C-alpha cells in the first residue's frame, strides 16, 4: 500500500485512480468489517446469508492507497482506501488507519476527492447493495 500526502488526482497509481473514477459507492469499514460483509453477502462465501443481496464479489486486498489527509500537532491523519468489485460495480472501502484519526479531516478529503459517491458504513451496507441492484436492473 502506498502512502501519499496528496489529493487523489495526484496519485501515481493510475489503475487505482481509474478504479475510483468508476466507483459507485463509498463504504466506511475496517478490514475486519469488510471481510464480515464479504462472508454475509458474497456468492463466493459458503456462509452467504442473504437471499436478496447475493453478489459476485472480487476483493483486491493487495491493491490500496493510503493518504495523509492532514496533520494535528505534527502527527499525520491517514486514511486507507481499497477498491472491490461487487455485482460488477466498483466500491471503495475506507477507514482511518493512523494512531491519530480526525473524522472531520477524513470527511473533508472524501468530499473533495470523491464528491460523486454516496456513502454508508458497515452497519447500513445494505444501502450500497441496494444501489448496486438498482444500477444493474436499470441496465437490463
Image: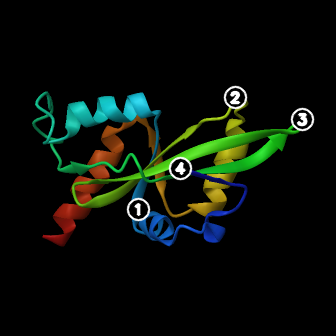
Label 4, label 3: how far apart the Cα atoms are = 25 Å
Which residue occupies the foreground of this view, 1 or 85?
1
The residue nearer to you, when weighing 24 against 59, is 59
Relative horizontal placement of residue 26, taking residue 4 as reference (left or right): left
SS label for mark 4? loop
Gap between marks 4 and 1 measured at Cα: 19 Å
Q: Which residue is mark 2?
A: 99
Question: Residue tagged by mark 4?
Answer: 1
Residue 20, percent across and down? 47, 63
Decide if residue 123 is in sight here: no
Residue 110 lies, in percent from the top left, at 61, 53
Residue 46 point in image, percent of width and height: 10, 31
In this view of the protein, which residue sits in the foreground, 35 or 40? 35
* Res 135 quadrant in image: bottom left
Q: Which mark is residue 45?
A: none
Placement of 27 over or under 98, stated as above or below? below
Amino acid at each position: 500500500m502506498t502512502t501519499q500526502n496528496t489529493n487523489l488526482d495526484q496519485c501515481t497509481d493510475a489503475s487505482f485512480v481509474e478504479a475510483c473514477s468508476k466507483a459507485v459507492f463509498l463504504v466506511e469499514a475496517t478490514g475486519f468489517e469488510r471481510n464480515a460483509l464479504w462472508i454475509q453477502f458474497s456468492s463466493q462465501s459458503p456462509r452467504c446469508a442473504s437471499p436478496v443481496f447475493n453478489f459476485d464479489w472480487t476483493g483486491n486486498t493487495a491493491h490500496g492507497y493510503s493518504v495523509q489527509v492532514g496533520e494535528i500537532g505534527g502527527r499525520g491523519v491517514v486514511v486507507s482506501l481499497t477498491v472491490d468489485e461487487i455485482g460488477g460495480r466498483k466500491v471503495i472501502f475506507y477507514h482511518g488507519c493512523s494512531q491519530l484519526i480526525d473524522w472531520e479531516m477524513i470527511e473533508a478529503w472524501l468530499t473533495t476527492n470523491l464528491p460523486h459517491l454516496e456513502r454508508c458504513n458497515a452497519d447500513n451496507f445494505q444501502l450500497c447493495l441496494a444501489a448496486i441492484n438498482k444500477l444493474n436492473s436499470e441496465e437490463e
